Amino acid sequence: MTDCVAIIDYGSGNLRSAAKAFERAVAESGRAMAVKVTADAADLAAASHIVLPGVGAFADCKAGLHAVPGMVDALTQAVRRQAKPLLGICVGMQLMASRGLEHGVHDGFDWIAGDVAPLTPDDPALKIPHMGWNDLVESRGHPVLDGVRTGDHAYFVHSYALKPAVETELLMTCDYGGPVTAVVGRDNMIGTQFHPEKSQETGFKLITNFLGWRP
Amino acid sequence: MLKTRIIPCLDVKDGRVVKGVNFVDLVDAGDPVEQAKIYDREGADELCFLDITASSDNRETIYNVVGRTAEQCFMPLTVGGGVRVNEDIRKLLLAGADKVSINTAAVKRPEFVQEAANKFGTQCIVVAIDAKQVAPGKFEIFTHGGREPTGIDAVAWAERMVAYGAGEILLTSMDRDGTRKGFNLPLTRAIADAVTVPVIASGGVGTLDHLVEGVREGHAAAVLAASIFHFGDYSIGEAKAHMAAAGIAMRL
C-alpha cells in the first residue's frame, strides 16, 4: 500500500498551500507518497501520516473538528492506538494540549500536558499577535527536527501559546519577550506553533523529515 | 527575536502586473507568479498583491493568480483590492491567500471587519488604512485612492478596527504615496503606538533609509514598498542588509 499523508480539513483556513508544500516535499524527496486533504474520517484509517492544521480560535477549531462526523474518534484511534505519526500545526498543535484558555476554558486532546494561554511578553511594546519570522532555539533533538537548528527562522502568527507541563516534551522555543513554545513532541506526536508550510527552507526540512518519520 | 518584515507589493490588473520589476530574465514579466517567485528567492518576508482590476467581470483572474502563486511560493501572501463581502475573502483564502486586506468596504460598513474576523479569524484580516495629515498632529482617512475625504480620524479608526478584530493594519501615507520622500512618520508612529497589533508602513519609500526611519521613528513592525523594488533601484537583499546595518533585526 502506498503511504499517504492525510491533511484533515475541518473548515479551518485554507489548506491549499499546506497541501502544495507537502506535495513539493514528497516530490523532492523522491518518495512514493500520496497527499490527501480530507474531511472523511475513514481516510485516516488508510493514512500512514496525519496532519492536523488549524487557524483561528481554539474553541472554533475544536468545534469545527467535532462537527466532522467520526473525525475525533478516527483521529484518536489513529494517533493513540495505532501510533501513526501526527503533525499538529498552529492551532492544530494547540488542540493537542490539555486545555485552551482562549475565550473561556476548553478541553483539548490532552496528548501534550499543559495549557494554551495568552502570550504575555515582558516588554509591553511587543505587538500581539506575534506575527512574522522568528529564530528558533533548540531545547532537545528530534528526528523530525533533523537539520533544523538554533538560529533558523520560522513564520509565526498567534496570540496564544502552549506551555508544556512536561519539560522533555518541549523541543524548540523562540524568544518574544520571554521564551515561547515553538515545537512540542511526545511519542508519535509532534506539533509546531509556526507554519512549516510558510517557512520556506526550515519548513521543508521539517515536512520532509516528518514524511519519513517512523516512530 | 522577531524580525522586521520587508513586504514587496505587486499591483495586479486583470491578472497582469501593472507596475512590476523589469527583470530581463523573465519569460513573461507581466505574470505576477514569475515576479512572486523572484521575490521568494530574494528572501522577501511576505508578499502582497493589490488587485486593481476595475471590472467585476475580471475578478476571477485574481483567484487564478493567487492559486498559481500559492503553488510555487511558500511564503505568506496578502491580497487586497475590491474585497467587499465574506464570499470574496473565502474565495481568496481557498485560492491560497493567507491574509486578506479590507479597505473601502470597512469604511462603508465597519461591522464587515467584525464579521470577517469572526468567520475567518483575526490572523487573516488586515485592515488597510489610507490616511493624510490634515493639520499638525491630525490625520484623516481617505478612500478612492486618496481622493475622497471621510472626516474620520485615522488614529480612532485604527483603534476601532483592531477592536473589531483586525489582526494587522496596513497603513499608507497617502500624502507621501508616489512621492519617494519617505513615510509620513508622525502618522505612522501615531497609529503604531495606538494599536496593539502590528502596523505595516507603506507609501512614499524612495531610499533604503526611509525603510529604516519607518521602523525606528515610525515604530512600524513591517515595511511595504513597491516602486524601489519594481524599478530595480534596490533588491530585497540590499534593503535587508541596509536595515540590518542600521541595527534593525532582520531575517538575512
Image (cartoon, coloured by chain):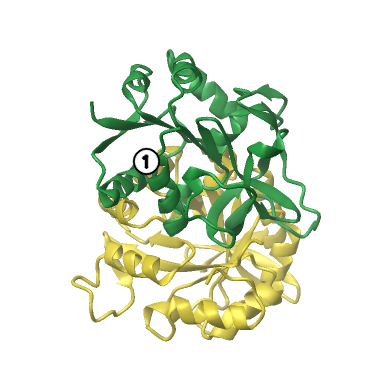
Chain colours: A green, B yellow
* Residue sitting nearer the eye, A17 or A179: A179
Question: Number of marks in the image?
Answer: 1
Q: State the image quarter where residue A35 is shown.
A: top left
* Residue sitting nearer the eye, B167 or B244: B244
Q: Is residue B141 above or below residue A26?
A: below
Residue A110 percent across, percent down from the top left? 63, 23
User: Can see residue B120?
Assistant: yes
Q: Is residue A90 left or right of residue A71?
A: right
Q: Residue at x 20, y 70 (%)?
A: B28
Q: State the image quarter where residue A51 is shown.
A: top left
User: Can see residue B107?
Assistant: no
User: Label 1 belongs to which residue?
Assistant: A212
Q: Residue at x 50, y 52 (%)?
A: B102
* Residue sitting nearer the eye, A114 or B236: A114
Residue A154 percent across, percent down from the top left? 53, 55
* SS at badge 1: loop
Residue B153 percent across, percent down from the top left? 69, 60
Q: Is residue B74 left or right of residue B201?
A: left
Amino acid carrying label 1: it is: Gly
Q: Residue at x 58, y 29 (%)?
A: A95
Q: Neighbour class for label 1 at 10 Å: few (<14), some, many (≥20)?
A: some
Chain on which label 1 sits: A
Residue A86 percent across, percent down from the top left? 47, 31
